[in-house]
Image (spheres, rainbow, N blue to C red):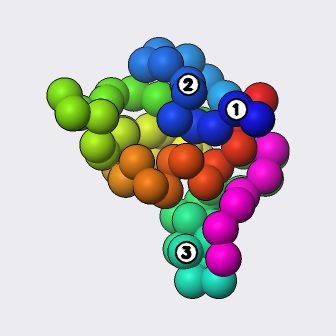
């Protein structure tokens, strides 16, 4: 299983599945990250947290704990 954490800077990945429960999963979906959407990894902070991605035409910063729940291909 490959997660968004495994995607390198400058690469694009397609979301396959969201893991997680209840409010956490809902918050990720509310940010526009849903099944089938393309996510482009723009930047990663020096210590790896947060990660800046482009999704649906806007920039979004995600915590490491959140990107581990996003399965991609």
Q: Earlier in the sequence, mark 2 or mark 3?
A: 2
Q: Which residue lies under the disc numbered 1? A: 2
9 horizontally vs 32: left or right: left
Q: Earlier in the sequence, mark 2 or mark 1?
A: 1
Mark 3 lies on a secondary structure that is helix
Q: Which mark is residue 14?
A: none
* Displayed quadrant of residue 13: top right
Residue at 52% from the left image edge and 35% from the top image edge: 5
Q: Residues within 10 Å of mark 3 (few under 14, many from 20)?
A: few
Q: Is residue 12 magenta?
A: no
The location of residue 24, given as percent across then percent down, is: 55, 74
| Residues at discs 2 and 1 in contact (Cβ within 8 Å) | yes
60 horizontally vs 23: left or right: left
In whole angstroms, how far apart are the C-alphas of marks 1 and 3?
A: 19 Å
* Displayed quadrant of residue 55: top right
The location of residue 9, given as percent across then percent down, is: 43, 19
Residue at 21% from the left image edge and 33% from the top image edge: 47
């Amino acid at each position: 299983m490959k997660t968004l954490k495994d995607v390198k800077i400058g690469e694009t990945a397609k979301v396959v599945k969201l893991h997680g429960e209840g409010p956490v999963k809902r918050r990720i979906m509310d940010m526009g990250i849903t099944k089938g959407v393309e996510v482009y990894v723009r930047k990663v902070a020096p210590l790896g947290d947060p990660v800046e991605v482009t999704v649906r035409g806007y920039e979004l910063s995600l915590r490491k704990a959140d990107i581990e729940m996003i399965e991609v291909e």
